[in-house]
Image (tube, rainbow, N blue to C red):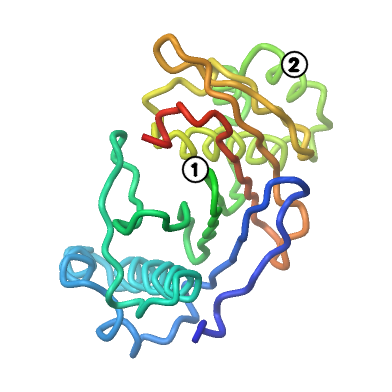
Amino acid sequence: MIASNIVALPSPDGLDIALWLINLDHAPQAWNDAVLSEEEADRAARFRFEVHAHRYQASHVALRQILGQLTGQNPASLQFNTGSEGKPRLAQLGSPHFNLSHSAGWALIGTCASHPIGVDIEVIEPLNDAATLAQSHFTPSEQAAFLRTPAERQLAAFFGCWTRKEACLKALGSGLTIEPHTFEAGLDPQPRHTTIQVNDQACAMQVSSLIDLPVGGLAAAVAKLFDPRSPGLL
């Protein structure tokens, strides 16, 4: 059974990805002990503030419930390991690919049967240095598009581009070990194809913003890695 704080979202066209938005601050606390592993419980106990521990627990309970439903397994019995880039995945061969992102009281989970994916969600908060951050982390064409954006829309445009870049990097499992300014993700929320150079390999993917979220004040994106030889598939 999926908790009431987990809402299914429509998938961007052509990506064949299932998505869920999770309200971490309205999760049933009683489910944690029954679903989480000992390692997850220990990690939650190390958080300094209770709200952060609860949000961590809620995000991992949601992930286990969703993956349990997809695989037909007991959520508490799911076993995880990591790929070559340290990205978590289900230990059982043939299991769906997944990715989890959280920001403050919200989380986004994506799954895909065939290819590695990355998701990112951010609570849109005021930034005094958005232009400086764009100069550091965006490509020249993205910087130009940001500067052309009307001032009242620049904050949303910044977070839109940032979540797209994060989703691409998470599809690879590379975090920020690859500089965000080295590849195009774009400010336009529509789907686009891009490539990220990993050593001597160009990794192809499609990235799209989620523009119909049922909650305001959030930016989110999802990316699907296409090349079967890419790091995220190893």
Judging from the image, what secondary structure is the residue with disc 1 in?
loop
Q: Position of residue 165 (x, y in %)?
A: 57, 32
The answer to the question of whether label 1 and label 2 lie on touching residues, with beta carbons closer than 8 A, is no
Q: Position of residue 52 (x, y in %)?
A: 33, 66
What's the amino acid at mark 2? Ala
153 shown above or below 81: above
Q: Nearer the viewer, residue 199 or 227?
A: 227
- Residue at the front extreme of this rendering: 94
Q: Position of residue 53 (x, y in %)?
A: 29, 69
Q: Residue at x 46, y 55 (%)?
A: 100
Identify the residue under disc 2.
Answer: 144
Q: Position of residue 112 (x, y in %)?
A: 55, 53
228 shown above or below 189: above
Earlier in the chain: of badge 1 and badge 2, it is 1
Quadrant of the image occupied by residue 77: bottom left
Identify the residue under disc 1.
Answer: 116
Q: Is residue 145 left or right of residue 77?
A: right
Q: Residues within 10 Å of mark 2 (few under 14, many from 20)?
A: few
Q: Quadrant of the C terminus?
A: top left
What's the amino acid at mark 1? Pro
